[in-house]
Image (spheres, rainbow, N blue to C red):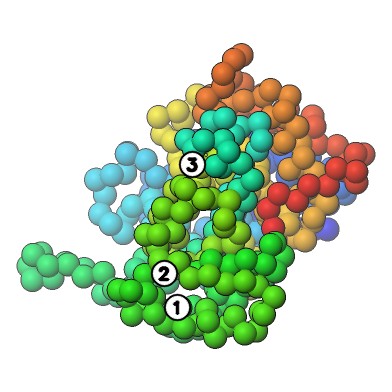
Amino acid sequence: MNKHIILLPGDGIGKEIMESAKQILNAVAGEFGHHFTLHEHLIGGAAIDQNNTPLPEATIEACQEADAILLGAVGGEKWDGLPAEKQPEKGLLGIRKELGLFANLRPIKGFPSLLYASPLKEHIIDGSDILIIRELTGGLYFGQPSERQENGDAVVDTLYYHRDEMERIIDKAFQSARLRHNHLTSVDKANVLESSRMWREIVSEKSSEYPDVVVEHELVDAAAMKLITQPDQFDVMVTENMFGDILSDEASVLTGSLGMLPSASVRSDGVGLYEPVHGSAPDIAGQGIANPLGTILSVTLMLRHSFQMETEAAAVERAVRESLEQGYYTADLDIKHGRPVSTEEMTTAVLDNLSVKSVSDSICNMYV
Ligand code: IPM
Ligand code: MG
């Protein structure tokens, strides 16, 4: 298959982990007979430095033509003093909105060999396998007005959702639950917010179209608590933009390895933007020690969700799992013994484990 992929390394460690992703994509193309064209563009602070804007037109145009996009990370203290519209994060929010990537998928599943590093007791986190689905292009993040009023003494952020925006993300969540364990937890604040009451109504209406999916409604504060006390009770969670941002950060550390977690931001036609959940980590940028696995696993989400390359995705996931089992750990993984490996060494380990021949007898589908 021919696929056209745009790479947006961004800032901080984004550049280093993107190098790893390129090697993995090239290896997958070689092993499986695909042709991937890879083109890099600017976003975030790097784009501000060169073009005085976090999201240049050239980047938007290139992404609009792409089959899929891979992003490293944006942000860093260097740009802290700039006005709101010049913040690196605006580049990320802008590209999500421009491309209509309304569904953010954040799978949270630990690798058995890393569970000791979880802040939770191992028996509590063991067996947890959660997919958080976050609405990504509406709600408080994009409501108008969002401004200071009364000479700066008052402030308003608007939480606006149209029914259509809620319906499409809730549909996506039901469909994802069907591909997993048929259990959907809808998270809202219906005891306080009108938007949440409408959200809950729509989830209830939709549930009659998916009678095979068990639905639960959970208030966001209770959901935050249960993520810590009973994470294995969740399968698919669906929620609006702001709640999803907060809950997914909370959930992401449960497996003991934020540096491992991938994410996908997709729309209905399969085009998607894939990125690791971790940030740009300016404190370790340029040292060659960043964990590339969150990005490499984001590549697996791209292969699966945008290209329907299930075998290829499973082969990369298996190579990651095997590399960890062989004792390769980057410094963030809090190893108990031995020397942490560099970004490049970890990438090489995954490449070495990535081979076609034994795929068929060890298919693993970590993330659906
Ligand atoms: C995320 C990030 C972004 C968000 C920031 C960088 C704007 O926290 O992807 O979760 O809030 O959506
Ligand atoms: Mg976040």
Between residue 254 and residue 232, name the one nearer to us.
232
Comes first in the chain, label 3 or label 2: 2
Cβ of mark 2 under 8 A from ligand 1: no
Q: Amino acid at mark 3?
A: Val
Between residue 290 and residue 210, name the one nearer to us.
210
> Position of 95 compared to 197: left or right?
right
The image quadrant of residue 362 is top right
Between residue 296 and residue 236, name the one nearer to us.
236
At x 48% / y 70%, what residue is drawn? 217
Residue 335: mark: none
The quarter of the image holding the C terminus is: bottom right
SS at badge 2? strand
> Position of 176 compared to 97: left or right?
right
> Position of 5 compared to 205: left or right?
right
Q: Residues within 10 Å of mark 2 (few under 14, many from 20)?
A: many
At x 31% / y 59%, what residue is drawn? 85
Q: Are marks 2 and 1 in contact (CB under 8 Å)?
A: yes
Residue 253: mark: 3
Which residue in the protein does label 2 denote?
A: 188
Which residue in the protein does label 1 denote?
A: 199
Q: Amino acid at mark 1?
A: Trp
Q: Position of residue 18 (x, y in %)?
A: 60, 40
Q: Residues within 10 Å of mark 1 (few under 14, many from 20)?
A: many
